[in-house]
Image (spheres, rainbow, N blue to C red):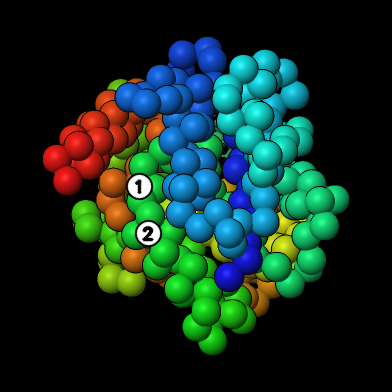
């Protein structure tokens, strides 16, 4: 199955908090972004139509990576939200000859531990009738009990980092959305344009994943069970976890 990959990498990593984008943090065997792209370039290069990496306007690091010379990899400049960055990536796919009904897999530059098995499961899901109709995303059933916190005002007089429970949210049927998320080029473009239009209205906000934009137009994407190792590097502890995962995978291949 032919597909394109869009890798949004235009974020600033504010929660990570080192003053430089987290996608360039070092891990065993390469930086975060290099690991994020590796499974796509490794697995089914014959099916891969091309990769678009979406960079921040001030990015000077990407051009220094060997990846920048890869024949299938091109770059474009992102926007103020993840949705705007992905939309810029989709424009670049179209400029490279992407057809409206072709699949685009959107994967966070900040997810360095995607496995070949997860990627295979996602692609297989796209071949099912439900996947064909609305696309699919990797996701994980929520394991912990989930609490909703009261608004900050309800916490008046308390310590700012402590929150008060307002409710317990039944976790039945709750999943955490991971990436990659796969949708057709035309459908995803229309969905993100719609989402950004709504976000521009007073009180609006941009969706934090592609599926939310598709759902808002009535789509019902497939949830494909992913791996808990497919961590998104958000905080420094996530980088340590990712390093451990990659090191143990490298160990295993050495012993095979
Ligand atoms: N991203 C992007 N363009 C934006 C915002 C985010 O391309 N305007 C990308 C990030 O580079 C990342 C992915 O979307 O690969 C997921 O976003 P997130 O984890 O929130 O990364 P950051 O926005 O960089 O981090 P933070 O929210 O802590 O600033
Ligand atoms: Mg962000």
**Residue at numbered disc 1:** 230
Q: Residue at x 54, y 86 (%)?
A: 129
Asked if residue 240 is positioned above or below residue 171 in the image, the reply reads above
> Which of 102/173 is in front?
102
Q: Is residue 46 left or right of residue 156?
A: right
Give the label on residue 169, or none: none
Q: Residues within 10 Å of mark 1 (few under 14, many from 20)?
A: many
Whereabouts is ligand 2, in terms of quadrant? Answer: top right
In the rendered view, tell whether residue 38 sits above or below residue 207.
Answer: above
Instruction: Measuring from the top left, give residue 62's x and y in whole percent.
Output: 62, 23
The mark closer to the camera, 1 or 2, is 2
Name the quadrant containing residue 226.
bottom left
In the image: residue 47, left or right of residue 95: left
Residue that label 2 marks: 118
Measuring from the top left, give residue 215's x and y in whole percent: 60, 70
| Relative horizontal placement of residue 25, taking residue 72 as reference (left or right) | left
Q: What residue appears at the point 66 percent right and 21 percent down from the top-left corner? A: 63
Kind of element beneath mark 1: loop
Of residues 71 and 137, the one drawn nearer to the viewer in this rendering: 71
Is residue 223 in sight in this rendering?
yes
Sequence-first disc among 1 and 2: 2
Contact? badges 1 and 2 (CB < 8 Å): yes
> Residue 80's image quarter?
top right
Quadrant location, the N terminus: bottom right
Report the number of numbered marks. 2
Q: Residues within 10 Å of mark 2 (few under 14, many from 20)?
A: some
The secondary structure type at the circle numbered 2 is helix
Give the Cα separation between the discs numbered 1 and 2.
Answer: 9 Å
- Residue 76, how many percent across, how many down? 76, 36
Question: Residue 249: where, in percent of width, then height?
Answer: 24, 40
């Amino acid at each position: 199955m032919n597909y394109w990959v869009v890798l949004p990498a235009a974020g600033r990593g504010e929660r990570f908090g080192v003053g430089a984008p987290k996608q360039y943090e070092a891990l065993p065997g390469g930086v975060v972004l290099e690991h994020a792209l590796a499974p796509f370039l490794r697995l089914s290069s014959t099916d891969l139509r091309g990769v678009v990496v979406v960079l921040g306007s001030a990015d000077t690091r990407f051009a220094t990576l060997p990846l920048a010379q890869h024949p299938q990899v091109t770059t474009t400049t992102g926007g103020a939200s993840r949705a705007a960055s992905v939309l810029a990536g989709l424009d670049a796919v179209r400029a490279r000859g992407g057809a409206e009904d072709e699949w685009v897999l959107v994967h966070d530059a900040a997810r360095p531990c995607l496995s070949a098995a997860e990627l295979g499961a996602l692609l297989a899901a796209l071949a099912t009738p439900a996947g064909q109709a609305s696309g699919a995303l990797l996701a994980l059933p929520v394991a912990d009990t989930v609490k909703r916190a009261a608004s900050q005002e309800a916490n008046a007089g308390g310590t700012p980092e402590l929150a008060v429970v307002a409710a317990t949210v039944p976790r039945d049927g709750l999943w955490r959305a991971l990436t990659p998320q796969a949708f057709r080029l035309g459908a995803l473009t229309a969905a993100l344009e719609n989402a950004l239009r709504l976000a521009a209205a007073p009180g609006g906000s941009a969706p934090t994943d592609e599926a939310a934009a598709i759902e808002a137009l009535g789509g019902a994407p497939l949830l494909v069970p992913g791996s808990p190792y497919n961590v998104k590097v958000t905080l420094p502890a996530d980088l340590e976890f990712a390093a451990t995962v990659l090191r143990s995978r490298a160990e295993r291949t050495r012993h095979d």
